[in-house]
Image (spheres, rainbow, N blue to C red):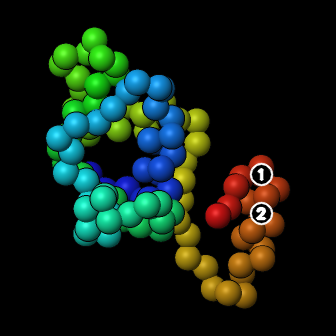
Amino acid sequence: MKTTGFVWNEYLASWPDGQWLDDSDETINGRGPDDFIEIPATAVVEFSAGVVFKDEGDVVGKSLVSHFRAWLKQRDSVTLMVTVGKEHEQQLLAFVKSIKGKTQ
């Protein structure tokens, strides 16, 4: 599975206290997560394995891919990376602001 650093950070920040990840294989821009103090918003995060445990009593867990996909489905927003010509940057930012969107 592939996502951006921005979405990955949002996903991890949504976890309740006590939830954790084990046996994951995520890479960030092709490197291991231990190489990063903060994951850049524009980073490419890839993973295919891992187990998410909701608390200490959870002995089975849920696959990271399944957990992430379920989280994506329940979100009420989407995150887009968009490329526009410099001459249209201010127009795009104004439009995003007009619909109460956020930019980074």
Q: Is residue 56 above or below residue 16?
A: above
Find residue 49 and report its horizontal and vertical position in percent.
17, 44
Find residue 18 and report its horizontal and vertical position in percent.
40, 24
1 and 2 marks in contact (CB < 8 Å): yes
Q: Badge 2, how many Cα within 10 Å: few under 14, some, many 20+?
A: few
SS of the residue under disc 2:
helix
Residue at position x 67%, y 87% from top? 86
Q: Is residue 84 above or below residue 80?
A: below
Find residue 26 and report its horizontal and vertical position in percent.
25, 53
SS of the residue under disc 1:
loop
Query: In the displayed image of the protein, which residue is found farthest to the top?
Result: 57
Q: Is 89 left or right of 14, judged from the image as shown?
A: right
Residue annotated with mark 1:
99
Q: Considering depth in this image, is 50 or 74 the residue closer to the camera?
A: 50
Find residue 54 and report its horizontal and vertical position in percent.
34, 21
Q: Is residue 66 visible?
A: no
Residue at position x 26%, y 15% from top? 58
Task: State which quarter of the image contains the C terminus.
Answer: bottom right
Residue at position x 47%, y 26% from top? 17
Residue annotated with mark 2:
95
Q: Is 50 left or right of 17, judged from the image as shown?
A: left
Q: Is 29 left or right of 78, judged from the image as shown?
A: left
**Residue type at tag 2:** Phe
